[in-house]
């Protein structure tokens, strides 16, 4: 399947707002400079043409010129006026606010083509906070090649920065066309010092023998690139910001749904705008609440084993604790010989004194003979009961959605996120795959639902369902151990809940289009929660998070993977142009939460409200005065006070 892209007015408006900020800038196509080729290999012959480089021409506008342009754009887009130009990176910094799922990657790629067409600028760097986003951006460039070729008659040359292939930087510098380098912050932001621990970060600042004794950062900076920050709120660290200045950017464009630091905002399409304009899926929530749980059994959850150089290992265990306001769950650190009974003051933990903390198999043993392993819940049958209910409800929601969309030619997908691969599958000593509890629960619940409801479906849908065995309709997407080829838990680095596993994202992105076809039997996907940034498949209609109940993931982050409008079997986006007022009846995302409906919705609404730009609470005279409107004849008019009355 191939995605079909169309021109969307709101995306065009975002592009035009950016381009208009430089109105009056002359076009300088192919601005040449003499490149530093470094020290030549002995016997290598160079010619004058080898030294030719093409960089972005300087901005010839004054600060006053750009301020005037920006204020005109802000007035036209009903955005609060900037008091001054932002000079954090280069001559100016422009904020483009776009809700998740509305196509900000498409917008900034198209912006590159327009900036090149209008002003001749051709060197761009897309900076991203994670490998997941980096791989997704590269995938978008591949998917959009033919689309932009049709409109602009040219292609952008793009590549992912790789410290093992620095020759790409010479091509970036010497080519006169549109050139884009995609780089994640880990490649340059760990340290500005050559002695830094991060090898990749160290390389970019070092003189390399295999690169003509040149520093890669100097070769990049000579091009005066335009920096495009994708999710800038995740890249606000001091080291990152200092490192970005080393690229000597011409200016910077910041694209996000949730900006933290404000620059000069020229376009805003927040969550409320996107919902009102029917540009994203509508969200509905199924929540669950377990009652009469506390104090019923000796609940334990081994969160982690903490190692240190000078002290014995310590276990972080979640247990129930008696307090002034009743019994509640708490996570505490315990040493060998510590008593959980003393810590909790609950008789259910009598005999739970730690006898051993085993760092080799991540387990804790107690004097009563019980052993628990990392990520394991003990004594809380309601946890698995709740997870079974979540899986059952996800399957039910899936079938309800699928029976409606099947005849419309739209594939329905459901996505499960979990924290432990072993809960889905593991391996025995012979290396053979062993079904985990979620695998078994899913197949039991899927078969039960189908047996009870198959006869209620129409003939065409029944034939489709009968084509595939239950073992074919679900699949796990996880990180792969390079030595064994086995699925493993995705590793995350300190301060991050996202994985850097390129192979896992490659697998997800490679199968993105295939999963949308009815010929592909898989409709239910299990993946590690640390890989969730890699999932942006538009036909995800159900999201279920089967993680430990204490995990803290932002609600907007949880639903963000399923907000994009779906596509049909021909790759056509099912938007307002295709469906009219039914667009959000077809495009409806169901979240199966592992908490009460009220708690989840309250949290989601609170996070969404915090992300919204300021809006007037009433339309009075002050609201209308000064607004720019489009007249029936197409002209623009600023409302004066008399007209506002």
Image (spheres, helix red, strand yellow):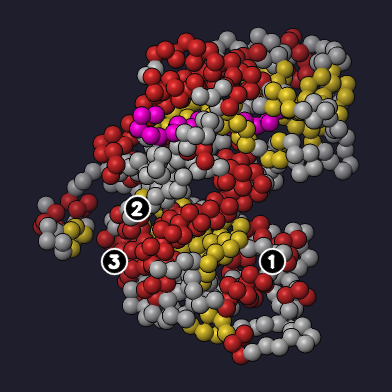
- Which residue lies under the disc numbered 3? 72
Element at label 1: loop
- Which residue lies under the disc numbered 2? 6
Q: Position of residue 345 (x, y in %)?
A: 73, 14
Residue 161 visible at all? yes
State the extent of the magenta-drawn residues as a range.
406-422
Is residue 1 or residue 274 the one in the foreground?
Answer: 1
Using the image, determine if residue 6 lies above or below residue 239. Answer: above
Q: Position of residue 176 (x, y in %)?
A: 51, 77
* Magenta-span inclusion, residue 152: no
Element at label 2: loop
Residue 186 in the figure: left or right of residue 84: right
Q: Give the class, few, some or many, for how many residues have Cα within 10 Å of label 2's Cα (few <14, many ≥20).
A: few
Using the image, determine if residue 638 lies above or below residue 129. Answer: below
Residue 578 in the figure: left or right of residue 290: left
Tell me which residue sits at (54%, 18%) in the image: 446
- Which residue lies under the disc numbered 1? 165
Element at label 3: helix
Q: Give the class, few, some or many, for how many residues have Cα within 10 Å of label 1's Cα (few <14, many ≥20).
A: few
Q: Position of residue 563 (x, y in %)?
A: 43, 39
Tell me which residue sits at (73%, 24%) in the image: 434
Mark 2 → mark 1, Cα distance in angstroms: 35 Å
* Magenta-span inclusion, residue 407: yes
Pointer 1 or 3: first along the chain: 3
Tell whether label 3 touches label 1 (CB within 8 Å). no
Is residue 488 or residue 258 the one in the foreground?
Answer: 488
Mark 2 → mark 3, Cα distance in angstroms: 28 Å
Q: Position of residue 109 (x, y in %)?
A: 45, 61
Using the image, determine if residue 328 lies above or below residue 493. Answer: above
């Amino acid at each position: 399947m191939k995605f079909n892209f169309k021109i969307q007015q709101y995306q065009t408006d975002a592009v035009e707002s950016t381009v208009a900020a430089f109105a009056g800038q002359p076009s300088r196509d192919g601005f040449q400079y003499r490149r530093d080729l470094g020290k030549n290999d002995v016997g290598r012959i160079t010619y004058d043409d080898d030294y030719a480089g093409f960089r972005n021409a300087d901005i010839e506008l004054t600060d006053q010129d750009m301020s005037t342009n920006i204020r005109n754009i802000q007035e036209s887009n009903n955005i609060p006026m900037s008091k001054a130009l932002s000079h954090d990176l280069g001559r100016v910094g422009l904020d483009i606010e776009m809700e998740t799922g509305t196509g900000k990657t498409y917008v900034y790629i198209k912006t590159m083509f327009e900036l090149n067409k209008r002003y001749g600028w051709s060197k761009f760097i897309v900076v991203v906070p994670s490998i997941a986003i980096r791989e997704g951006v590269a995938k978008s460039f591949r998917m959009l090649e033919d689309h932009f070729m049709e409109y602009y008659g040219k292609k952008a040359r793009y590549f992912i920065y790789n410290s093992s292939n620095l020759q790409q930087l010479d091509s970036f510098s010497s080519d006169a066309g549109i050139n884009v380098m995609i780089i994640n912050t880990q490649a340059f932001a760990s340290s500005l010092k050559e002695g830094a621990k991060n090898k990749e970060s160290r390389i970019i600042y070092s003189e390399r023998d295999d690169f003509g004794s040149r520093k890669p950062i100097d070769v990049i900076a000579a091009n005066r690139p335009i920096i495009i920050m994708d999710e800038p709120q995740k890249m606000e660290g001091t080291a990152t910001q200092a490192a970005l200045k080393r690229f000597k950017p011409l200016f910077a464009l910041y694209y996000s749904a949730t900006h933290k630091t404000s620059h000069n905002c020229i376009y805003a399409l927040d969550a409320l705008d996107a919902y009102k304009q029917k540009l994203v899926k509508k969200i509905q929530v199924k929540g669950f609440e377990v009652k009469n749980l506390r104090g019923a059994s000796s609940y334990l959850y081994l969160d982690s084993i903490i190692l240190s150089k000078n002290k014995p290992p310590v276990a972080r265990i979640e247990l129930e604790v008696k307090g002034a306001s009743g019994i509640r769950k708490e996570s505490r650190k315990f040493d060998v010989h510590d008593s959980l009974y003393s810590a909790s003051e609950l008789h259910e933990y009598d005999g739970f004194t730690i006898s051993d903390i085993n760092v080799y198999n991540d387990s804790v043993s107690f004097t009563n003979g019980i052993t628990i392993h990392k990520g394991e819940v003990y004594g809380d049958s309601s946890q698995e009961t709740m997870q079974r209910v979540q899986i059952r409800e996800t399957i039910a929601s899936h079938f309800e959605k699928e029976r409606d969309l099947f005849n419309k030619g739209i594939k329905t997908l459901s996505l499960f996120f979990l924290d432990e691969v072993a809960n889905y599958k593991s391996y025995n000593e012979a290396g053979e795959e062993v079904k985990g509890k979620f695998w078994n629960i899913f197949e039991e619940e899927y078969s039960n639902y189908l047996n009870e409801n198959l006869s209620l479906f129409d003939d065409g849908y029944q034939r489709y369902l009968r084509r595939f065995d239950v073992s074919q309709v679900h699949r796990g997407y996880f990180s792969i151990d390079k030595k064994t080829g086995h699925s493993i838990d995705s590793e995350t680095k300190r301060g991050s809940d996202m994985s850097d596993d390129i192979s896992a994202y490659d697998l997800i992105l490679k199968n993105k289009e295939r999963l949308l076809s009815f010929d592909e039997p898989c409709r239910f996907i299990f993946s590690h929660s640390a890989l969730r940034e890699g999932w942006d498949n538009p036909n995800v209609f159900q999201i279920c998070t089967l993680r430990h109940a204490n995990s803290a993931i932002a609600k907007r982050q949880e639903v963000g993977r399923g907000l994009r409008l779906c596509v049909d079997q021909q790759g056509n986006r099912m938007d307002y142009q295709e469906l009219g007022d039914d667009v959000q009846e077809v495009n409806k995302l169901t979240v199966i939460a592992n908490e009460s409906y009220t708690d989840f919705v309250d949290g989601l609404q609170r996070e969404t409200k915090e992300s919204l730009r300021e809006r007037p609470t009433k339309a009075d005279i002050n609201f209308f005065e000064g607004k720019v409107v489009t007249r029936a004849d197409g002209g623009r008019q600023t409302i004066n006070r008399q007209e506002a009355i």
